[in-house]
């Protein structure tokens, strides 16, 4: 087991929420152990938690109570971060990123209900399940806790096995909801963002770049003659071409770029703070990488190429996101019409042009 006290590092951490002045004596400790598989003992977690995130933030003012609760949680193969009040809990959350929070309702200065209210009011923390507990709580307090967003309320004295079962249930629910959210936002074949994510992110990236006064680029790629790949080599080979193409695209973009499967054999990159020249270079690198794909069927390499269209501008007040996407699509159409396996871009004054008009020799 590892145990590390955190003091000054938390005080200097950049907060994700607004903090109040922390009372003297506030502290937090992270404890836990390596995730070694244990027999699935009822009430002790075991195998069902091996592949499930299980970081629990424990918020309890009493050191003796924290000690007991910490040991119970660790015995169920959970990783525990401790805080003794609301302020330290708020500071710990961005660093520890808990999967669930177990908190005393009677916290000093600011109670557990205030903790629930704050976390459920922030988009970055509202999905974290919070379990409250207390020696005594009125019906009104319990109702208030649930109305604010707590997922459970545990009465003391604790029954260890029941407490762990409740925490596991909260972790399991959070895990399942996270997986559902990911599946709703990801393309099942390639693992890229899906069209819905693209349609949500493009306007937001446009607005962010407009405020900063920077350029926004859109790149659209369409695999050439993809239908013939499916017809001649089968859909399994076609799927493999899509997977490998997505992987290649992921290697040429920046971490800040959004890469999405637009539909069928089309991929889109939304690149914030990216000038046209850089976007065309990115697009042509991807085109070159696709031509080098190593998809083989029955010992025979399947030839794959792609056509790419690019549009970018910093004049976002004049060019809305839908128009920028349309410009990239128009450039893609010209790349297809020119013979395929080509990169074209949209010039805001002259319309679609081949990449060679912008890139120097050997720049792609």
Image: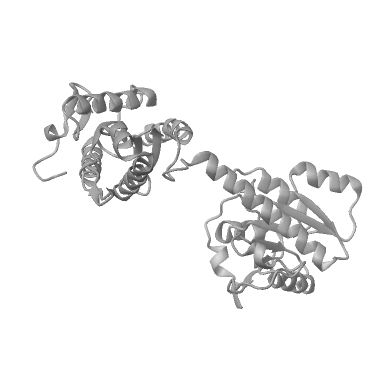
How is the structure coloured here? one colour
Q: Quadrant of the N terminus?
A: bottom right
Q: Residue at x 69, y 67 (%)?
A: 24
Q: Residue at x 23, y 39 (%)?
A: 305
Judge by depth and name the residue closer to the eye, 4 or 238.
Answer: 238
Residue located at (45% from left, 30% from top)? 199
Residue 44: give x, y in percent of width and height. 73, 69
Would you place residue 66 above or below residue 171 in this image?
Answer: below
Residue 279: percent from left, percent from top: 25, 39
Where the C terminus falls, by quadrant?
top left
Q: Is residue 41 visible?
A: yes
| Residue 252 placement, left or right of 69 | left
Viewer-side residue, 80 vs 264: 264
Count the marks: how many?
Answer: 0
Q: Quadrant of residue 225?
A: top left
* Residue 124 is at least partly visible in this image: no
Determine the residue located farthest toward the left in the rendered image: 361
Name the side, left or right, on which 274 lies relative to 55. left
């Amino acid at each position: 087991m590892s145990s590390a006290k955190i003091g000054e590092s938390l005080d200097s951490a950049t907060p994700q929420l607004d903090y109040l002045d922390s009372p003297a004596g506030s502290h937090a400790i992270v404890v836990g152990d390596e995730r070694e598989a244990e027999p699935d003992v009822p009430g002790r977690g075991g195998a069902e938690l091996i592949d499930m995130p299980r970081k629990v933030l424990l918020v309890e003012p009493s050191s003796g109570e924290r000690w007991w609760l910490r040991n119970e949680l660790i015995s169920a193969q959970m990783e525990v971060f401790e805080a003794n009040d609301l302020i330290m809990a708020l500071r710990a959350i961005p660093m520890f990123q808990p999967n669930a929070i177990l908190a005393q309702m009677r916290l000093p200065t600011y109670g557990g209900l205030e903790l629930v209210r704050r976390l459920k009011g922030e988009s970055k923390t509202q999905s974290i399940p919070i379990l409250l507990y207390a020696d005594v709580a009125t019906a009104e307090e319990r109702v208030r806790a649930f109305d604010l967003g707590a997922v459970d309320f545990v009465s003391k004295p604790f029954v260890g096995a029941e407490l762990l079962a409740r925490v596991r249930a909260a972790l399991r629910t959070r895990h399942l909801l996270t997986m559902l959210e990911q599946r709703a936002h990801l393309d099942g074949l390639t693992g890229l963002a899906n069209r819905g994510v693209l349609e949500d992110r493009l306007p937001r990236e446009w607005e962010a770049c407009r405020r900063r006064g920077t350029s926004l680029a859109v790149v659209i790629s369409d695999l050439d003659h993809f239908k013939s790949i499916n017809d001649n080599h089968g859909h399994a080979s076609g799927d493999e071409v899509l997977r490998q193409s997505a992987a290649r695209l992921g290697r040429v973009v920046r971490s800040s770029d959004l890469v999405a499967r637009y539909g069928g054999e089309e991929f889109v990159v939304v690149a914030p703070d990216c000038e046209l020249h850089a976007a065309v270079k990115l697009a042509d690198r991807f085109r070159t990488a696709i031509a080098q794909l190593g998809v083989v069927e029955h010992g025979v390499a399947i030839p794959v190429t792609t056509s790419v269209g690019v549009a970018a501008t910093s004049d976002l007040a004049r060019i809305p996101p839908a128009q920028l996407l349309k410009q990239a699509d128009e450039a893609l159409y010209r790349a297809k019409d020119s013979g395929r396996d080509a990169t074209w871009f949209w010039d805001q004054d002259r319309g679609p042009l081949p990449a060679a008009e912008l890139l120097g020799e050997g720049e792609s």
